[in-house]
Amino acid sequence: GLQGTHLYVLYESYGFSVASLFSLGFVAGAVATPITGPLIDKFGRRRSALLYCALEIWINQLEQYPFYAGLVVSRMVGGVTTNLLNSVFEAWLDTECRLQSLEKEKYELILRDAVVVSNLA
């Protein structure tokens, strides 16, 4: 979405290699993928969602300054938060829908609307 475009311009304005920073985030996410699910199961979906929010706030603070080490850390943590974003919220929704005995049609409607809104952002 829009964040990628924003970060490209931001990193370029700092004079750093945009490709290297983006690649670092992708590699960090790939390395963290096998442990993300088990950690979410261990700590819980709600805590993991709150962790995602806190880490994103921290990442955004790090990206405000043209300090290369801070940007490297932000991209590495960003790889992990991407995994959280793409798993914890849907898993939390799935668990809650099962606990609330939500009808399958309503659950599918929520997921459909989430995808539509996500793609519009």
Image (tube, rainbow, N blue to C red):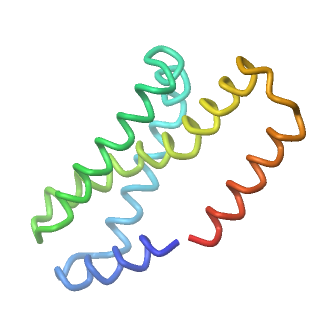
Against 111, residue 101 (above or below) is: above
Residue 14 coordinates in the image, percent (x, y): 17, 80
Residue sitting at the far top: 42
Against 91, residue 98 (above or below) is: above
Judged left or right of residue 103, residue 6 is left
How many numbered discs, if any? 0
Give the residue at x 26% y 51%: 57
Judged left or right of residue 21, residue 29 is right
Against 80, residue 13 (above or below) is: below
Say which quadrant the C terminus sits in.
Answer: bottom right
- The residue lying toward the viewer, choosing from 43 and 108, is 108
Residue 11 coordinates in the image, percent (x, y): 26, 76
Against 18, residue 103 (above or below) is: above
Give the residue at x 14% y 57%: 69
Residue 20 coordinates in the image, percent (x, y): 34, 68
- The residue lying toward the viewer, choosing from 14 and 17, is 14
Residue 84 coordinates in the image, percent (x, y): 49, 40
Judged left or right of residue 108, residue 88 is left
- The residue lying toward the viewer, choosing from 48 and 31, is 48
Give the residue at x 57% y 38%: 89
Residue sitting at the far right: 105
